[in-house]
Image: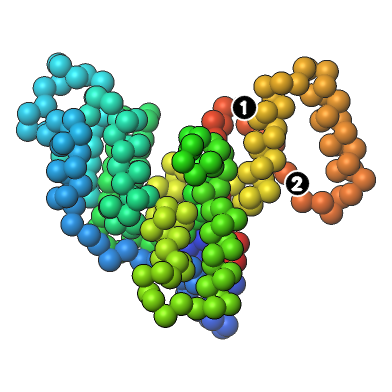
Amino acid sequence: LHYTHWGLVCPAETPEGQACGLVKNLSLMCYVSVGSPADPLIDFMIHRGMEVVEEYEPTRYPHATKIFVNGSWVGVHSDPKHLVHQVLSTRRKNVVQFEVSLVRDIRDREFKIFSDAGRVMRPVFTVQQEDDDETGIQKGQLILTKELVTKLAQEQAEPSDDPSEKLGWEGLVRAGVIEYLDAEEEETAMICMTPEDLELYREQKIDEATLTVEERQAKQEAEKREQEEERNKRLKTKVNPTTHVYTHCEIHP
C-alpha cells in the first residue's frame, strides 16, 4: 500500500492467490462522496468579499488568493484566512454538506473547494482551534466531550423512538465532532494518533513556554532513561516547535 492509502484502504483484507495485494478493499469507515451543488457555496463566498474572476484586476490585488471550485477558477479573495474560517465553520454547523472538501494552499496562495462525486473520504475527530466560551472547550482539546459520550451510551442502553432525539453517528457529524477528510484535505491537516498524544502535546507546549533550559534538559534525560528501562513502551512524538496546533485526531475503533 502507498502511504496516501492510510485509513482509506484496508491493509489486511485482500484475496489469496495470484490477485493478492493487487485487489484492495475499502476500509469499513470509508465513505465515497456522492456530490453536491457548488453554486450556493460560490454565492456564499461572493457575499463575503470574494471578487469574481471576470472582474479581477491583478494590479489591484497582486497577492490575492485564488479560489477554485471543483477545479474551476471562480474568483479571488484578499483575506483568505478569514474566508476559510467562515466556510469551515459553516461546514461544521452542517449548513454546507459534510462531504465538501476545503483545501488551503498557503504557499501557492490557492483555496480549493471540492464538492464533486467519487472522492474517497475517511472520518476523524476534530480538535478545537480557538477557546470556546459557550461550550467551555479550550484550544487544542477534542470537540467530543464527556457529555456527548454519555449521551451516546444512554442511547445504546435505552434507544429512543423519536428519530429527532437520536444523536448517533450522523448527529456527531452534524455537531462538527467528526469530519470527513479526503486525501487532498488530509495533506493540509495535522492529525495526531490518540487523544492521549493530544493531551501530552498540550502539556509539552505549556512546558516549552514556562520551563527553563536546564529544567527542560533534565526532563528530557528522565524521559530517555524511562524509555531505556521499558523498551516495549510506545514512542511518543517529539514536540515540533513549528507546529502551531493539531487540527484532527485519528479514530481507532
**Residue 75 visible in the current orientation:** no
- Determine the image quadrant of residue 46: top left
Whole-percent x, y for residue 134 in the image: 46, 41
Q: Is residue 63 above or below residue 15?
A: above
Q: Is residue 102 above or below residue 242?
A: below
- Hey, which residue is sitting farthest left in the picture? 54
Quick one: SS at disc 1?
A: loop
**Residue 239 visible in the current orientation:** yes
Image quarter of the C terminus: bottom right
How packed mark 1 is, by other alpha carbons closer than 10 Å (few <14, some 14-19, many 20 or more), is: few
Between the residue at mark 2 and the residue at mark 1, the CA separation in whole angstroms equals 18 Å
Work out whether residue 117 or residue 92 is closer to the camera in this orientation and state it: 92
Q: Could you tell me if the residues under marks 2 and 1 are in contact, i.e. CB atoms within 8 Å?
A: no
Work out whether residue 61 or residue 124 is closer to the camera in this orientation and state it: 124
The amino acid marked with disc number 1 is Pro
The residue depicted at 92 percent of the width and 45 percent of the height is 229
Whole-percent x, y for residue 210 in the image: 71, 21
The residue depicted at 55 percent of the width and 48 percent of the height is 142
The label shown at residue 235 is 2
- Determine the image quadrant of residue 180: bottom left
The label shown at residue 241 is 1
